[in-house]
Image (cartoon, rainbow, N blue to C red):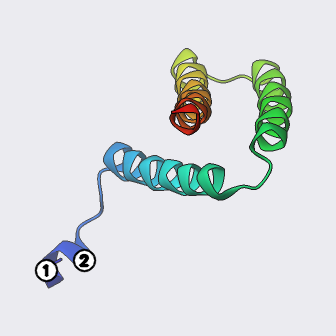
Amino acid sequence: MRDDDDARKPDPLLYLGGQVNALLAFVAALVQSHPDRPGLLAAFRRTAQLQESQTLNAAVSDDYLRGQQETLAGIEKLFEALAKAEKR
């Protein structure tokens, strides 16, 4: 990164997208290395349900809810893909 880029404020949506992408990479590494993947999946689902119900009780936009649901679905797909790869 150049020095003049440091003074420039990042685009908030692009910045947030980068943060989410980095967190998903961390989640993938965590899931791959976890010794009790079924237990981790069950805990994830419980926590996700609790978070979703709390979010639905809050005044948030449809875009927020959609982003949350799509990200949670992406994590579910990660669990599925890893389980499928292990069966091969």
**In the rendered image, which quarter is residue 8 located in?**
bottom left
**In the rendered image, which quarter is residue 42 located in?**
top right
Disc 1 marks which residue?
2
Side (left or right) of 71 relative to 4? right
**Amino acid type of the residue that numbered disc 2 sits on in the rendered structure:** Asp
Residue 36: image location, x then y, percent: 80, 49
Q: Residue at x 45, y 56 (%)?
A: 22
61 to 27, vertically: above or below: above
Residue 73: image location, x then y, percent: 58, 24
Picture quarter with the N terminus = bottom left
Q: Secondary structure at mark 1?
A: loop
Disc 2 marks which residue?
6
40 to 69, vertically: above or below: below
Crowding near pointer 1: few (<14 within 10 Å), some, many (20+)? few
| In front of the other: 56 or 33 | 33
25 to 68, vertically: above or below: below
Q: Residue at x 48, y 53 (%)?
A: 25
Q: Residue at x 60, y 52 (%)?
A: 32
Residue 40: image location, x then y, percent: 79, 43
